[in-house]
């Protein structure tokens, strides 16, 4: 009796959509925060609308984490899921760093 040939199972590569998702979210945060570099020196500002958009973008970035975790579980040695996980956690700190840097460079005052 002949043994049938074995058919290799082709494994599909995991989607890199979560990586691109968090890259776009971080890019939008950068585009949103770059406006503070044009604030005149000594101006007193209250960026409440900007803060709301940053918080919303932060939650949108966190949506990628449940998509990334199964890929990390199956293939922990892949680099891009770890990068995507790191970038999913950075929109809010990135906005804070850009705002701090713009305040130091331009000299505006944040009102309480």
Image: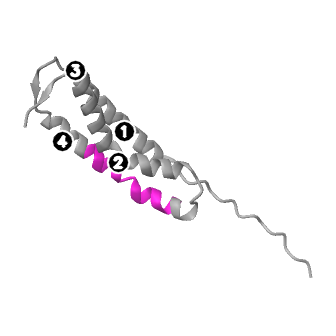
Q: On the picture, is 50 further left or further right than 85?
A: left
The residue at 15%/36% (across/down) is 49
In the image as oriented, which residue stretches furthest toward the right? 1
In front: mark 1 or mark 3?
3
Tell me, yes or no, whether the two marked residues, 3 and 2, touch with CB atoms within 8 Å.
no
Q: Which SS class for mark 4?
A: helix
Reading the image, the residue beneath label 4 is: 52
- As measured in the structure, the alpha-carbon distance from the residue carrying label 1 to the one carrying label 3 is 23 Å
Residue bearing mark 1: 26
Asked if the residue at tag 3 contacts the one at tag 1, i.e. Cβ–Cβ closer than 8 Å, the answer is no
Q: Give, as a single range, the part of the protein colored magenta.
A: 56-71
Q: Nearer the viewer, residue 17 or 76?
A: 76
Q: Distance between the residues labelled 3 and 4?
A: 22 Å
Say which residue appears at 31% left-offset and 48% top-offset.
60
Q: Is 60 inside the magenta-drawn segment?
A: yes
| CB atoms of marks 3 and 4 within 8 Å | no
Task: Kindly identify which residue carries mark 3.
Answer: 106
The residue located at (52%, 48%) in the rendering is 16
Q: Are the two marked residues, 2 and 1, in contact with CB atoms closer than 8 angstroms?
A: yes
Distance from the alpha carbon under mark 1 to that under mark 4? 15 Å
Q: Does the magenta stretch include residue 102?
A: no
Residue under label 2, please give it: 61
Task: Say which element carries label 2.
Answer: helix
């Amino acid at each position: 009796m002949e043994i049938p040939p074995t058919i290799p199972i082709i494994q599909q590569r995991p989607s890199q959509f979560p990586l691109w998702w968090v890259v776009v979210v971080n890019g939008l945060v950068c585009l949103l925060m770059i406006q503070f570099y044009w604030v005149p020196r000594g101006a007193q500002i209250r960026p409440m609308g900007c803060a709301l958009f940053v918080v919303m973008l932060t939650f949108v970035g966190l949506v990628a984490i449940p998509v990334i975790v199964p890929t990390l579980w199956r293939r922990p040695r892949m680099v891009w899921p770890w990068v995507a996980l790191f970038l999913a956690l950075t929109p809010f700190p990135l906005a804070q760093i850009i705002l701090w840097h713009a305040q130091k460079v331009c000299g505006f005052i944040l009102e309480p």
